[in-house]
Amino acid sequence: MIAEDEPAGLADFRQEVRGFIAEKLPTVVREKVRRGVILDRDELDLWERQLTARGWFVPHWPERWGGLAMEPMWRMTLDEELARNDCPEASPFGPEMVGPMLMQFGDDAQKEFFLPRIVSLEHHWCQGYSEPNAGSDLASLQTRAVRDGGDYVVNGSKIWTSGAHYADWMFALVRTGADGKPQEGISFLLINMRSPGITVKPIIGIHGWHLFNQVFLDDVHVPVANLVGQENMGWTIAKSVLEHERLKLSRVPECHRRMARVKALAASLKERGQPVAQRDWFKLKLATLEVRLMALEASVLRFRRQALAGGRLGAETARLKLRGSQLVQAFDNLTVDVAGPLSLPYDHASHHDLVDNAPRPWDVATTSARRFMGRGFTIAGGSSEIQHNQLAKQVLGL
Ligand SMILES: Cc1cc2nc3c(=O)[nH]c(=O)nc-3n(C[C@H](O)[C@H](O)[C@H](O)COP(=O)(O)OP(=O)(O)OC[C@H]3O[C@@H](n4cnc5c(N)ncnc54)[C@H](O)[C@@H]3O)c2cc1C
């Protein structure tokens, strides 16, 4: 926890969260998370249902929409405890992206329909921004939406769409205009993934897991009622969503999870007859990362308070995403340093199953796969080069 004076009641809240986890986290879910194995949708639902029943799936949302308007210090404590105690990372798309976006830009009907269904877990979402020829240069996207009576007819393809294989809805950027700058012809649509004309094809990552997809849209009819904001103003909405996404992509809880793991691993393994945890090189590296984590956490807290007060987050959030993705990978690298040759085996059986009979400690079998996954954090949500460019131009005015 960061070096801000701990407010009264926070220690009790921390205990309350730990008690909740001990009681409600299903064993099968806890064991998979401990081993670093990817959960399937049903397993994740088991846990998210517990969070939702307790009001902790969207604790930062206003009470009007099923949240608790939780003060950010409490929210960060909640997230930290969940991560450190083997709870799965909840999907960010509904709670962190679509929800806040609709509260700001959606019309009343959209809010009334979609927000409660995020909280009740009836709708899972995916993000349809990137295309085969539009990633960093997102404004060059070509998926086209053409008005046909009360519908848009959408044609094109989205790629790297995380979780599209179990999503019910996709929030997507589509081209609706060709005049002016490319940014001026983009609209923001909410697309039902069960619509005729949608095909989801899996992409298997270097880590061996199926997390991404390519989504093909062929003459998909989307009611005009599912347009958010005005036609051709999608770029403004997309930027706001990215700013909120970067709060999540600061990955502070995930750093806490990794820090707890690497400490436990270092205590359980020996080097030259001594627990790794007592080796000077390890203590120095760990202390360096812990200080970096405290600094990042303090920045995130400031932005979360800004978000709760309804303020715009702005381009400076690029710093959070940049630092968070670097820090997660620094913890992953430290874990590999600690595990040494134990982290080398990298095969399907070792990280797809519960590896009950594996001769290695439970938490090293997926070390390599996890490290490959963390590598993707440099790119996801906008690559590091793009974050640097944004900071240089929009924050520093260079
Ligand atoms: C784990 C993961 C999850 C993802 N999930 C989703 C998702 O759910 N939905 C979605 O829409 N997308 C998703 N993406 C896609 C992601 O947003 C894009 O991969 C990213 O924006 C980069 O685009 P690109 O892959 O086309 O690379 P490119 O844009 O082709 O970039 C290639 C390289 O060139 C560099 N580069 C490009 N332009 C510049 C520049 N102007 N200055 C300096 N360097 C530059 C980049 O930094 C990069 O190193 C995901 C990606 C990953 C890795």
Image (spheres, helix red, strand yellow):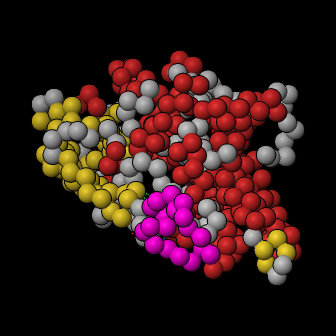
> Is residue 373 at all visible to an observer of this figure?
no
Left of 287 or right of it: where is 30? left
Locate residue 280, reporting x and y percent: 86, 74
Q: Residue at x 21, y 36 (%)?
A: 222
Q: Is residue 114 placed above or below 362 in the rendered structure?
A: above
Residue at 56% from the left image edge and 31% from the top image edge: 51
The residue at the far front in this view is: 357
Q: Nearer the viewer, residue 98 or 232?
A: 98
Q: Quadrant of residue 333?
A: bottom right
| Rendering quadrant holding ligand 1 | bottom left
Specify whether 97 is left or right of 371.
left
Magenta-colored stretch includes residue 343: yes
At which x and y percent is residue 64? 53, 17
In percent of width and height, residue 284 lies at 84, 70
Residue stretch in magenta: 342-359
- Tell me what residue is drawn at x 64 percent, y 32 percent: 23
Question: Residue 282 occupies which quadrant of the picture?
Answer: bottom right
